[in-house]
Amino acid sequence: MNLGSSIRRRRKGGRPDEQPRRPLPEGVAALVSPRVLGIAAAVAVVGLGGGFLFATQVLFPAPELLTGFVEVPDVRGNRLSDVEAVLAEAGLELGAVDRFSHPLADSGSVVGQAPLPGQLILPGQTVRVATSIGADRRPIPTVSRLVGAQAADLLRASGFTVTVDSAESDLPRGGVVEVVPEEGTSLSLPAEVRLTLSLGPPSVEVPALLGLSEVVARDSLTALGLVVGDVEEVFRFGRDQGRVVGQEPPAGTEMERGAAVRLVVGRRGGG
């Protein structure tokens, strides 16, 4: 047997187990035609639509629309005297009225309501409103007898905003120099109060007084805002008589105005 010819015959005939395809019967081919497929799809859509209608209308029907309710009108910003008429026109009544201070709304103006505008309620029900009595007014407390932070803290505790300035003054350091507006003035909150505190009396430099006559030394101290304190007299010959031979504190010392300077003056005349 020739092996080459056997292999050629097998390739020509194909695989031994491969079967030739047979055409579909005429009836089956008719069932899978495009027309039949379109009809089947239409039937499926109709079936789904019918099932949806059955579920929504029979098994789970939509709730009935609410009837007999009225919409709450917006009465905010109206005067209380007008609110009752607005509610009556909507078939509602005015309920409880709350009053409180409001920094911006005028007295008698409605600033809140319950139920809120747009809500649905039954006719004849009441609407509660809140009205403004205007801004809260308070008098500025007396703080002139206090010192520094105590005065500022009392003003803040009274509801005021405090601005603190400082200035030289004959008052002790931290004393209240000025309150603007004045103490006792009634203000609508929020309001600002300016508080000026003392830096203490302005300081001056003690001048050199040695060798000056007592009269000139006194005038020099007075011109600077200082005062003459104790004057001690000591015996002196010649030119030191009637002149300052000692001072306390010494020249160049910084002192507050009104402070006293002690002088030592030579005794006038012999003895």
Image (cartoon, rainbow, N blue to C red):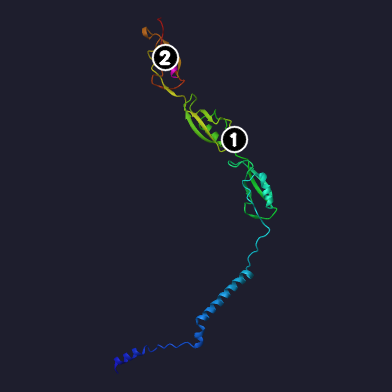
Instruction: Locate residue 158: give its quadrant.
Output: top right
Kind of residue indicated by mark 1: Arg
Front-most of residues 216 and 262? 216
Please say whether residue 43 is one of the residues in the magenta stretch: no
Can the viewer see residue 129? Answer: yes
Q: At numbered mark 1, what does the secondary structure look like: helix, strand or loop?
A: strand
User: What's under tag 2, amino acid-wise?
Assistant: Ala
Question: Which residue is under mark 1?
Answer: 138
Q: Can the viewer see residue 95 in this picture? A: no
Q: Which residue is mark 2?
A: 217
In the image, is 55 to the left or to the right of 15?
right
* Location of residue 174 with respect to 250 vertically, above or below: below
**199 is higher (above) or lower (below) than 137:** above
Q: Of helix, strand and loop, which one carries label 2?
A: helix
**What's the residue at 44%, 13% (across, down)?**
231
In this rendering, is residue 167 above or below 106? above
> In what quadrant of the picture does the C terminus appear?
top left
Residue found at x 44% / y 17%? 223
Distance CA(mark 2)–CA(mark 1): 54 Å
Percent across and percent down for residue 207 are: 39, 18
Q: Are marks 2 and 1 in contact (CB under 8 Å)?
A: no
Residue 139 at what x, y percent from top left?
59, 33
Residue drawn at x 61%, y 70% is 55
Q: Position of residue 78 (x, y in %)?
A: 63, 46
Main secondary-structure element of the magenta-colored stretch: helix
Q: Give the farthest residue toward the right.
A: 124
- In the picture, the quarter occupied by the N terminus is bottom left
